[in-house]
Structures are given as structure tokens and as C-alpha cells.
Amino acid sequence: MELNSKIYIAGHRGLVGSAIWKNLSEKGYTNIIGKTSKELDLLDPIATAQFFEEEKPDYVFLAAAYVGGIMANNTYRADFIYKNLQIQQNVIYNSYKQNVKKLLFLGSTCIYPKDAHQPISENELLTDTLEYTNEPYAIAKIAGIKMCESFNIQYGTNFISVMPTNLYGPNDNFDLEKSHVLPAMIRKTYLAKALLTDDWLTIRKDLDKRPVEGINGTSTNEEIARILNQYGIFEDRLELWGTGRPMREFLWSEEMADACVFIMNHVDFKDIVGHSKEIRNTQINIGTGKDISIADLSALIAKEIGYEGKILFDFSKPDGTIKKLTDVSKLNALGWKYSIEIEDGVSKIRQWYTKEQE
């Protein structure tokens, strides 16, 4: 990419898109464009086509997606498959139609089978059954990979798919129902500490910033306590889903963005197709290659936030896949490797979240 290339980031205000925007800006790129969902509904094929026709971007980062944690994935299954398929096909097709030089499609490591060999290499795709709780979302992301591969094979485009591991960082979604595991644990622990120490000012400021099911800082103590209890936050304890045993890998979002910009600049589809006549599994895993148990993560977050109450696990709730660790040797061989460890990342996101409340 040239510094003045027109670069469109779909989903530029989310966790992923905002990190990519920041990375590009810091590297000196000056012609970055983005549209909010109100300005451009990527579910609308006509509006999306019109946007691409008018803007004609040179490069596209497809970071827009309908995302959420295990509870949301299991509850809103139709939304997760329909909305993601629609966004992907609209953006990928119009990128082809308007001769975009290169597109980077961001998926998720949930595309891999629940019993995949560990660490999970790109070749594990479609070798076994997916995890049930997020199956619709995973199928949508697999379809995105296959769309990119198929357009490349048939039309000679240069569309690359990357599969980041579990991400966390600035501008994440901290919704207690729909967020991913780490941001949900950050907020729950933050609120649990405030409830434990009878710090209602902090609780009200938090709920004013991010209301929960209509409950905000103006609600009564009883209403607030009731909704927090519903999400496992009590005066004397914090309850988290599952057993705490699952192992998860986490990557700081700004490092993921750096990997994406690196790939956009240095890797083409021809570099990753191999020599087989059957072209598949061309996606690139982005991660650290290290994992931590949910129980150990909860203890790490509690220590960082200063929460001294009890942390219990609700065994009646699903764990999801027990272990999910990516093999990042392909990415490392291409020339990129992470640097921020989970301990430093948790400290950084705690600082960011606390500052957001001011």
C-alpha cells in the first residue's frame, strides 16, 4: 500500500477496525475511509454497491461483523449466520466488481473443529464437527474464507483471510450479555469490586456509560443489585460461566492490527496457496501460540483490579471447547510475531476501561 492509497476499513469503530485505523494512521497512511452502520448499512446490497461505486477504494479491510460471546452466539443463532453472511458477500463481491487491489477478510479461530489437534494449524479446517454454541457464526466465517479463495481462483483477485484468536483491547464490547469472555470478565470483576466495597458511585457511573437491560445510574439500588445478580455479580462473590478449566489464547487487539497491516503490505495470495492442485486452507492464523485457563485468567484480572471477593464457577453453564490454541508458525514464517504478554495486556485494558469511566 502507498501512503496515499485509498483504504476502506469496514467496521472501523469496533475493536478490530479501530485498532487497524490507529495502526495505519501511526504508520503515515493519509487516505483512510470508514462509515458507521447508520451511514452505510452493509447488510443492504444496493447501498453497499453504491458506496463501492462512488468511493472505489484501493484496499479493503473487512473487519465488520456481528459478534458476541458464548451466550449471545448460542441465543441469537439466526442473526449470527445471516448478518455475517450478508455483510461478507456484499463487501467481497463489490470489492471484486470495483477492482479492489487487495482485501483482507478477518474471521475467527472458532472456524476450527471443537476437537481439532492442538495447537490448531490452518489444515484443521473442515476436518471434524464444530463447537455447537457458535456453529452458525463459524459457518459464516468459513463461507467468507471460501468466498475469498474462490474469487481468487476464478477471477484472479488478491483476497486474503486471517483468523485472529480471542482478541481484547480498546473499544471492545463490554456488554454483559454479548461481549467476549475477557472483556466480560474485566467489567464483571470491576463491578464486583465496587459492589463488595459499597462503591455505588462507581457502579452508577459504569451503568450510565453502559446500561444493562435498561438499568442505568439513575435506577434504584435494588434494581441495580437485581440486574447485577442476574449476571453473576453479588455483594460477596462473582460467579462465572462454566468450570474455569477451558484453556484460551488471547491477543492484544493492537498487535492483531499490526499483523493485518503487515500481511496487507507483504503477503499476496500466491504466497500462501502452495503447490497442490486443490487450493484450500489458505487462511492465516493470528495469535500468540500461548494459552491460559479461564480460572487463572479470572485470578489475574482480580489481582489487577484489586478484587478480594470470592470467584465461583457455575458448572451448569457450558464451557465451550476445552482447549483452543492456534499454531501460528505460518504467520511467524511470513515474518510477524507478537510481543505483548497476557499479564501486560490485562493491565493495559484495565487502565483503558478505568479511564473510560472518568
Image (cartoon, grey):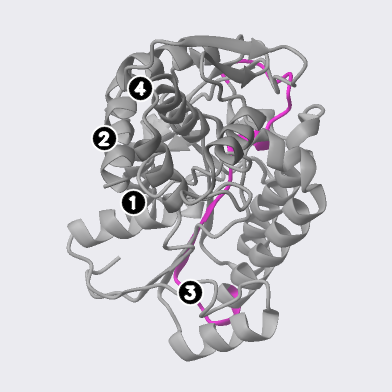
Residue picked out by circle 2:
351
Residue picked out by circle 4:
342
Q: Which numbered disc, 1 or 4, marks the residue closer to the eye?
A: 4
- Mark on residue 100? 3
Identify the residue at horizontal 73%, vertical 12% (top origin).
Answer: 315
Relative side of 189 to 79, left or right: left
Q: Say which amino acid is labelled 3.
A: Val
Q: Is residue 290 above or below residue 285?
A: above
Mark 4 or mark 2, earlier in chain: 4
In contact (CB < 8 Å): disc 4 and disc 2: no
Helix, strand, or loop for circle 4? helix
Q: Say which amino acid is labelled 2.
A: Gln
Range drawn in magenta: 96-119
Count the marks: how many?
4
Distance from Cα at disc 3 to Cα at disc 2: 38 Å
In the foreground, 306 or 75 = 306
Distance from Cα at disc 1 to Cα at disc 4: 27 Å
Mark 1 or mark 4, earlier in chain: 1
Q: Which numbered disc, 4 or 3, marks the residue closer to the eye?
A: 4
In contact (CB < 8 Å): disc 3 and disc 2: no
